[in-house]
Image (cartoon, coloured by chain):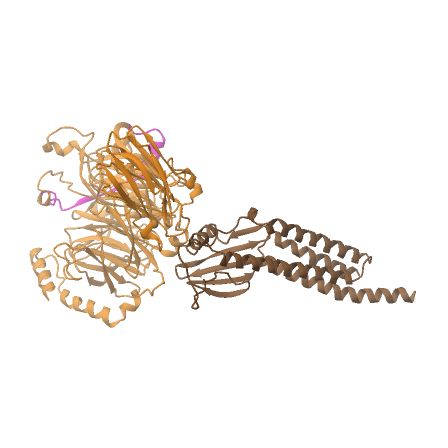
Chain colours: A orange, B brown
């Protein structure tokens, strides 16, 4: 009851837009429906059984990606991407710290928003998942055999990398569109000079089909709007990319008012194939830049940073026929393209209606040069000419839309807190279900591709309130799983999600599970400091640096007694896990280490630096309960005074 | 004796399968090994069923003080077995050939079968001795010392043939493709004997009628 009153208050606040008045009723129905229809059975995955789908949830401010099973809602793994992760030493070990290098130095955190799984011919192929770091603009690629971050590339001339990291239907490009426009190149000017001086860079990163390696192919230097979200065309609209904008007013202060004045903002339609052709023919301007490209190699188990010094920029007005503006009400947030590529759905977040543009009509208007003015030399199409239709008063504050592959779309409404199912062709509302509470994104596995798997929809809510036992003022967010196989959506489950999930991506388990890597082969270990046999283990001094080449296997370290270390030394533990068995990592923890512990996978080598500050005999041990003798997996390091002349020595079993 | 000779030759040649396929297979499964660990015993050495099974079996066995699984060069058997099998194949094929041209009678076939059976039983006996030694001759400093209810040290000898529960492991020990090919081959040499017997009689009769 309390909730319906809140909703009514909200409705009153945004007075007279719409009457979503049966909230309290559907609210009750939602709960009862779940109880009445055996929802528990539908989400129950018996012990030892596997889920049908993997779901990858962005962690928002956690900087990480979490992996869940659907329909159970069980969390399988947290993959560190943009944040240091003490659990396994990512971002702390010598091998992985380069992953977090940027032109601003070491940035060990970010705000991870939108995962997108690689595609071939518009179908999810499960090779990689791409994610964006919103804060310090970065795009990362996570390998879906190892579920580890393999590559992070920084995006220059960009700020608030929000309209990312969506990919084209053959993974030709990953885009990184800037939310905040900034001076390009950066300079020390008055913020009041925003209008006209600030630019919005839309970056297109090409993807090597063999290795997945990314490279910024070009940056379109767009007018200084805010580029919010984006989606690729598909099918007939393959070759186009669509970006929503807000703040076409180009305000630089009090944006909540000043950027909400225009009745319509734009969806920027980009014919990237045309721009690509222009670039391939030598078009564009090379501009000095400074950005980090970090690559992790599974052979050497090492990441390297390359600072790149140049980026190719494109003035959109120099490529005729490549960029157009589609007027769209009102401060559109999400832009989503139907699986067949015909409909471009713009969700005006201050609107009650959904705006559906027709790709065919857009092409027709462009071909006939039916323009209605221009902005910074970019033609603006006429709203009426390209409109396929609207879904009238579907709810309040539409954000994002996904598709089930059966002709239906599912749109989230933030203000009225509901998920609305509607028919893409007839644009009739079929069903609406309340969300608990304040829904952001919705995800249908493959719902962002030409071939959705329309069995479940997961909504990701911004507010948790009373859904679980309270845990003090800070709560995890809440996701809700709906069965969407029937006419009515049925709420099956809600489960907490870690961090702040923005978007998510789902894929059938049968695509990923068979190729998931179980171990790293020791014989393929090319780490510079690996000790591949126990005969390779040793300790070497190089001035104040000491390198310990150590191996680990159930249930001992080789060596396990080391003497001759001095206060003030910089001690590198290079530790190789000799196990070749699935799920037998060993941990390594050194007393007083100022960084982290390590979790080392079978066949892997990792390096941790330790700077002893106190004399004594200090233990190290394995942190992962690896065997019956896990507690015995330990060793000692003797630390002598700085001026000591005790010889380096090491041993095992003496 | 044409038919019998051919059967004898095919039968002996089937033993060549032992150079490619394992003779025996031992599988070790446990709740924490949903994909069981296994070893294939070839006449030339012991191999893991999956790439790292031997290493992982050794890792487990060290708790109870078992020696590591021998490499081919550590056991004389893996040098001798291929020679014996190779020799028997050559001998069998040669006898078959002589039979084909009517130079020897069917008793040579059963003679080869008898010799092969004796060698086979000796091989099994040796194999069993090795399993016993391997499963009972344990490191006195073993990490875990398990005893039977009567206080005697527990043996970890895998069964020569069949299934046995050993601590938390389900152990299965069965012949593998190489052995089956050998069995079929030996069966064929038996058949060659009976076919040869008939053919020899006919030959004798036709010889007498001349
Ligand atoms: Cu351990």
Q: Quadrant of residue A186?
A: top left
For the N terminus of chain A, the image quarter is: bottom left
Magenta part of the chain: A258-285
Q: Is residue A649 left or right of residue A220?
A: right
> Looking at the picture, does residue B153 appear above or below residue A630?
below
x and y, in percent, of residue B65 in the image: 44, 54
**Between A449 and A465, which is closer to the camera in this rendering?**
A465
Residue at the extreme right of the image, as rendered: B210
Could you tell me which quadrant the C terminus of chain A lies in? Answer: top left
Quarter of the figure with residue A148: top left
Quadrant of residue B1 within the rendered picture: bottom right
Q: Is residue A289 visible?
A: yes
Question: In front: A477, or B19?
Answer: B19
Q: Position of residue A498 (x, y in %)?
A: 22, 53
Kindly give the residue lying farthest to the bottom in the view shown.
A36
Indicate whether A340 appears above or below B188: above
What's the residue at 33%, 41% (across, down)? Answer: A561
Residue A651 as seen in the image, left or right of residue B101: left
Horizontal and vertical percent for residue A607? Answer: 32, 39
Residue nearer the viewer, A326 or A116 = A116
Query: In the displayed structure, does residue B188 sit left or right of residue A484?
Result: right
- Verify whether residue A273 appears in magenta: yes
The tally of labels here is 0
In this rendering, the answer to whether A189 lies above or below A577 is above
- Residue A27's x, y, as percent? 16, 66
Left or right side of A42 for B67 = right
A544 drawn magenta: no
Q: Residue at x 26, y 71 (%)?
A: A37
Q: In this orientation, does residue A320 appear?
A: no
- Above or below, A601 against A493 in this view is above
Between A635 and A209, the one nearer to me in the picture: A635
């Amino acid at each position: 009851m309390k909730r319906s009153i809140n909703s009514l208050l909200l409705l009153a606040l945004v007075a007279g837009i719409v009457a979503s008045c049966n909230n309290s009723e559907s609210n009750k129905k939602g709960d009862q429906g779940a109880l009445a229809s055996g929802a528990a059975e539908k989400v129950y995955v018996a012990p030892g059984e596997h889920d049908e789908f993997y779901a990858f949830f962005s962690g928002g401010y956690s900087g990480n990606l979490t992996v869940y099973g659907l329909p159970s809602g069980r969390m399988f793994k947290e993959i560190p991407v943009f944040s240091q992760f003490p659990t396994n030493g990512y971002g702390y070990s010598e091998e992985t710290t380069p992953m977090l290098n940027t032109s601003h130095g070491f940035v060990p955190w970010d705000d991870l928003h939108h995962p997108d799984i690689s595609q071939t011919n518009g179908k999810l192929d499960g090779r990689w998942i791409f994610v964006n770091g919103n804060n310090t603009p970065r795009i990362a690629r996570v390998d879906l055999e190892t579920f580890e971050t393999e590559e992070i590339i920084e995006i220059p001339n960009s700020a608030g990398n929000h309209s990312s990291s969506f990919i084209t239907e053959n993974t030709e490009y990953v885009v990184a569109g800037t939310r905040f426009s900034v001076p390009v190149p950066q300079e020390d000017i008055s913020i009041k000079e925003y209008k006209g001086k600030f630019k919005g860079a839309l970056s297109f990163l090409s993807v090597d089909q063999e290795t997945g390696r990314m490279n910024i192919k070009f940056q379109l230097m767009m007018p200084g709007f805010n580029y919010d979200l984006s989606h690729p065309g598909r099918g007939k609209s393959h070759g186009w990319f669509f970006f929503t904008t807000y703040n076409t007013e180009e305000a630089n202060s009090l944006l909540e008012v000043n950027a909400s004045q225009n009745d319509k903002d734009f969806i920027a339609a980009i014919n990237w194939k045309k721009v690509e052709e222009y670039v391939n023919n030598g078009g564009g301007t090379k501009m000095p830049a400074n950005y980090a490209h970090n690559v992790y190699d599974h052979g050497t188990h090492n990441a390297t940073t390359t600072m790149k010094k140049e980026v190719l920029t494109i003035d959109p007005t120099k490529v005729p026929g490549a960029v157009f503006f589609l007027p769209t009400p009102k401060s559109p947030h999400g832009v989503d393209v139907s699986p067949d590529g015909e409909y471009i759905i713009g969700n005006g977040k201050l609107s009650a209606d959904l705006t559906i543009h027709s790709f065919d009509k857009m092409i027709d208007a462009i071909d006939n040069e039916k323009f209605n003015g221009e902005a910074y030399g970019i033609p603006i199409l006429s709203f009426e000419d390209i409109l396929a239709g609207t879904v009238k008063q579907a709810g309040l504050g539409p954000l994002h839309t996904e598709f089930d592959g059966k002709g239906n779309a599912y749109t989230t409404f933030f203000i009225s807190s509901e998920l609305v199912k509607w028919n893409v062709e007839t644009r009739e509302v079929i069903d609406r279900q309340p969300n608990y509470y304040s829904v952001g994104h919705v995800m249908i596995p493959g719902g962002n591709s030409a071939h959705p798997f329309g069995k479940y929809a997961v909504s990701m809510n911004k507010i948790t309130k009373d859904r679980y036992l309270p845990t003090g003022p800070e709560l995890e967010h809440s996701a809700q799983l709906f069965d969407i196989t029937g006419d009515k959506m049925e709420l099956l489950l809600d489960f907490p999600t870690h961090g702040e999930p923005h978007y998510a991506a789902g894929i059938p388990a049968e695509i990923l599970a068979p190729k998931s890597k179980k171990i790293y082969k020791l014989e393929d270990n090319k780490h510079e400091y690996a000790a591949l046999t126990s005969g390779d283990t040793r300790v070497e001094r190089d001035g104040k640096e000491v390198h310990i080449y150590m191996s680990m296997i159930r249930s001992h370290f080789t060596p396990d007694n080391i003497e001759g270390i001095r206060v003030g030394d910089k001690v590198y533990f290079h530790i190789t896990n000799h196990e070749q068995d699935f799920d037998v990592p060993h941990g390594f923890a050194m007393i007083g280490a100022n960084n982290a512990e390590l979790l080392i996978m079978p066949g892997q080598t990792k390096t941790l630096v330790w700077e002893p500050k106190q004399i004594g005999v200090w233990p190290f041990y394995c942190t992962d309960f690896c065997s019956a003798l896990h507690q015995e997996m330990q060793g000692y390091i003797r630390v002598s005074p700085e001026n000591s002349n005790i010889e380096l020595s090491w041993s095992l079993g003496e | 004796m044409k038919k019998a000779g051919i059967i004898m030759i095919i039968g002996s040649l089937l033993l060549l399968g032992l150079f490619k396929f394992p003779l025996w297979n031992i599988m070790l499964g446990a709740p924490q090994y949903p994909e069981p660990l296994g070893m294939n015993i070839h006449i030339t050495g012991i191999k893991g069923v999956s790439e790292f099974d031997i290493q992982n079996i050794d890792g487990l066995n060290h708790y109870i003080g078992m020696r590591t699984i021998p490499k081919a060069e550590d056991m004389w058997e893996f040098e001798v077995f291929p020679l014996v099998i190779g020799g028997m194949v050559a001998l069998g094929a040669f006898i078959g050939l002589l039979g084909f041209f009517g130079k020897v009678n069917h008793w040579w076939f059963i003679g080869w079968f008898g010799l092969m059976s004796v060698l086979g039983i000796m091989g099994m006996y040796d194999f069993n001795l090795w399993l016993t030694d391997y499963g009972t001759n344990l490191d006195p400093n073993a990490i875990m010392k398990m005893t039977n209810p009567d206080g005697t040290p527990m043996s970890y000898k895998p069964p020569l043939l069949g299934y046995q529960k050993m601590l938390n492991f389900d152990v299965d020990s069965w012949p593998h493709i190489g052995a089956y090919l050998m069995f079929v081959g030996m069966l064929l040499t038996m058949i060659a004997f009976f076919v040869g017997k008939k053919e020899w009689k006919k030959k004798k009769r036709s010889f007498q009628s001349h």
